Image (cartoon, rainbow, N blue to C red):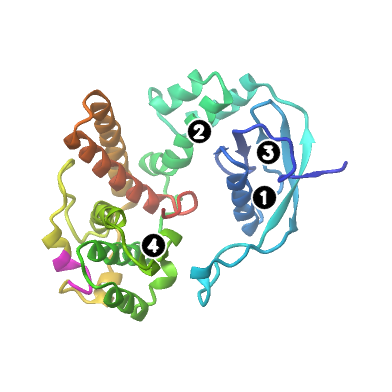
């Protein structure tokens, strides 16, 4: 049977991906699906990935064909390239599956993850379109591992403490930039600690752009919220109450190079138990939703601020307990 490349397949988005050894994955665009298939291939897990689209058509991944390597972005020259070479994913179409059957498959997975009464499970059952089902499946992607940790599964991997500590150092560098510390001094210190290679594309742009705008500086200041969540997870700081800004002076006293703690001691910090981090992530998920609902009813600056704080801390904590599912953005 002749296959078709994913880039040319007549997919109707969004689609759901059903790997042979993992949770269902929702995809709203073709590039995300291509990238995730390449990631699965790095662990030899791509073959047999089943794709169901919004038109009830199904395909399975049957192989990969190397494509042209992506053009190297200017800010990556001289740095290790973590991007995979371009790939073409070969698909074979199989028997169609109606929406009701697809939703039932997802519900079976969800019942193994969420407790009865969880709104994620309710949203899956209530979905009447692939778009609604895809949105509901996103909760499996984000919360699935945390729920398994909370249920007592000891085999769920989380990020290494050293990776979390390195990420905290990068966030503090961004916060220092927002506070007006000279950019060249920050970059020099990061280079000495070999942390430049750990920057996201957005962070690299912030430190290489000719002029930092006020909008960029404000966004950089908000990283304090994600930083305090990481410091809490490392046992280095208390989490400030929900809706309240962290105590910046406490952060400055702790985190190198401004703080008293040596870089070696900071990087040697240990994470709290995975269950504690997962529980805090769920708490901030609920706080984020509650704050969002308050803002929808009363779009005040106070309510917006509380929603932003809760969302940023939630995302940072989920990043720790989802090393294979959530990248830093």
Which residue in the structure is indicated by mark 3? Answer: 50
Q: Residue furthest right?
A: 1
Q: Is residue 325 magenta?
A: no
Q: Position of residue 84 (x, y in %)?
A: 61, 62
The residues tagged by marks 2 and 3 sit, at their Cα atoms, a distance apart of 15 Å
**Disc number for residue 46:** 1
- Element class at badge 1: loop
Residue neighbourhood size for the residue with mark 4, other residues' Cα within 10 Å, grouped as few (<14), some (14–19), many (≥20)? some
Which residue in the structure is indicated by mark 2? Answer: 137
- Element class at badge 4: helix
Assess whether mark 3 and mark 1 are in contact (beta carbons under 8 angstroms).
no
The residues tagged by marks 2 and 4 sit, at their Cα atoms, a distance apart of 29 Å
Quadrant of the rendered image containing residue 304: top left
**Disc number for residue 203:** 4
* Left or right: where 195 falls relative to 42: left
Q: Nearer the viewer, residue 247 or 62?
A: 247
Pair 2/4: label in front: 4
Pair 1/4: label in front: 4
Q: Which residues are magenta?
A: 252-258
Whichever of callouts 1 and 4 sits on the residue coming sooner in the sequence is: 1
Q: Is residue 257 magenta?
A: yes
Q: Position of residue 154 (x, y in %)?
A: 42, 49
Q: Position of residue 111 (x, y in %)?
A: 48, 28
* Left or right: where 278 falls relative to 53: left
Tell me which residue sits at (73%, 37%) in the image. 59
């Amino acid at each position: 049977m002749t296959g078709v490349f994913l880039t040319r397949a007549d997919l109707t988005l969004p689609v759901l991906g059903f790997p042979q050894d993992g949770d269902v994955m929702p995809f709203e665009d073709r590039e995300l699906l291509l990238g995730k298939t390449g990631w699965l291939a790095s662990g030899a897990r791509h073959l047999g990935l089943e794709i169901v689209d919004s038109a009830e058509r199904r395909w399975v991944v049957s192989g990969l064909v190397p494509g042209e390597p992506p053009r190297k972005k200017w800010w990556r020259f001289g740095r290790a390239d973590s991007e995979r070479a371009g790939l073409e994913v070969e698909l074979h179409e199989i028997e169609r599956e109606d929406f009701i059957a697809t939703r039932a498959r997802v519900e079976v997975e969800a019942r193994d993850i969420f407790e009865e009464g969880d709104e994620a499970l309710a949203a899956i059952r209530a979905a009447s379109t692939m778009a609604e089902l895809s949105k509901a499946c996103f909760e499996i992607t984000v919360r699935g591992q945390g729920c398994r940790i909370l249920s007592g599964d000891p085999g769920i991997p989380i990020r290494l403490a050293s990776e979390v500590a390195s990420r905290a150092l990068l966030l503090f560098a961004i916060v220092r930039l927002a506070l007006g510390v000279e950019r060249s001094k920050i970059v020099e210190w990061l280079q000495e600690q070999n942390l430049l290679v750990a920057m996201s594309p957005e962070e690299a742009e912030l430190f290489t752009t000719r002029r930092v705008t006020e909008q960029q500086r404000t966004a950089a200041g908000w990283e304090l919220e994600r930083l305090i969540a990481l410091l809490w997870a490392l046992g280095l700081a208390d989490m400030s109450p929900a809706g309240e800004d962290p105590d910046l002076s406490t952060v400055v006293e702790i985190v190198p190079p401004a703080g008293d703690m040596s870089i070696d001691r900071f990087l040697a910090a240990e994470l709290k138990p995975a269950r504690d981090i997962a529980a805090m992530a769920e708490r901030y998920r609920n706080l984020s939703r509650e704050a969002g609902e308050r803002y929808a009813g009363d779009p005040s600056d106070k309510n917006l601020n509380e929603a932003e704080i809760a969302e940023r801390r939630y995302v940072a904590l989920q990043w720790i307990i989802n090393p294979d599912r959530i990248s830093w953005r």
